[in-house]
Image: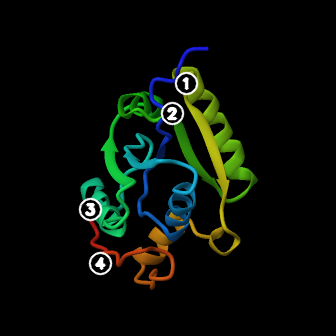
Amino acid sequence: MTPIQNSKRVALFPGSFDPFTNGHLDVVRRGAGLFDEIIIAIGNNSSKSRYLPVEQMVRMIEEVFRDEPRVSVQAYKGLTADFARQVGARFLLRGLRNTTDFEYENTIAQANRHVNPALETVFLITSPALAAISSTIIREIHRFGGNVDDFVPFPLPPYVELG
C-alpha cells in the first residue's frame, strides 16, 4: 500500500455562487466537520452569464468566513477536476436539495472522476429549512426589488440593469 501524498482532507466546494446562499453556507459549515480545509471555488460556467461579478462574490464570501481559517475562497477557470488537482483537493463537496439535483450532480461527479480518478465527490443533503433556496430564485426576487435578506448571508448590492 502506497502512502497518500497529502493526508490532509482538502475539499473543494465548486459552484457559480451567483449569489452564495444560506444553503451554500450550511453546506460549508457542515462540511467543515468532515474536512481539514474547504476551498470555496467560484467557477465560470460557460453557459451562464453572471448576475454579480466573480471578484465581488469572492470578497463577500471571504468576509463571511473571515474568522474561519480552514475555509478559503478562490475563483478559477477551466475544469473543476483539474482545479482540484492544482490545489491538492481530493474531495468535491456538493449539496443536494432534491432528486433533480442528484441526477445532475451524479453525472458531473462521474465526469470529474474520469478526468481526475483520485477525486471523490461527497454529497450532503440540504437542511430541510434551506431546501427551497436557489441562486436562481434569489436573483429573480432581487432583480425585481424584493427582499432577499433571509436567503443570503450578506446584503446584496442594489440591482443595476446592464446594457
Give the Cα distance between marks 1 and 4. 42 Å
Marks 1, 3: nearer the viewer:
1
Judging by the rendered image, the residue that carries numbered circle 2 is 90
Quarter placement of the N terminus: top right
Task: Indicate the amino acid at tag 4.
Answer: Pro
Q: Secondary structure at mark 4?
A: loop
User: Which disc number belongs to residue 118?
Assistant: 1
The residue positioned 61% from the left and 38% from the top of the image is 121
Task: Indicate the amino acid at tag 1.
Answer: Ala
Which of the two labelled residues, at mark 3 and mark 4, occupies the earlier sequence position? 3
Foreground residue among 1 and 9: 1
CB within 8 Å, label 2 to label 1: yes
Marks 3, 2: nearer the viewer:
2
Judging by the rendered image, the residue that carries numbered circle 3 is 59
Marks 2, 4: nearer the viewer:
2
For the residue carrying disc 1, how many other residues have a C-alpha within 10 Å: few (<14), some (14-19), or many (20+)?
A: some
Foreground residue among 95 and 157: 95
Judging by the rendered image, the residue that carries numbered circle 4 is 158
- State whether residue 149 is above or below residue 24: below
Task: Indicate the amino acid at tag 3.
Answer: Arg
Give the Cα distance between marks 2 and 1. 6 Å
Marks 3, 4: nearer the viewer:
3
Give the Cα distance between marks 1 and 3. 30 Å
Position of residue 40 measured from the top left corner of the image (x, y, whole percent): 41, 51
CB within 8 Å, label 1 to label 4: no
Which of the two labelled residues, at mark 3 and mark 2, occupies the earlier sequence position? 3
Which of the two labelled residues, at mark 2 and mark 1, occupies the earlier sequence position? 2
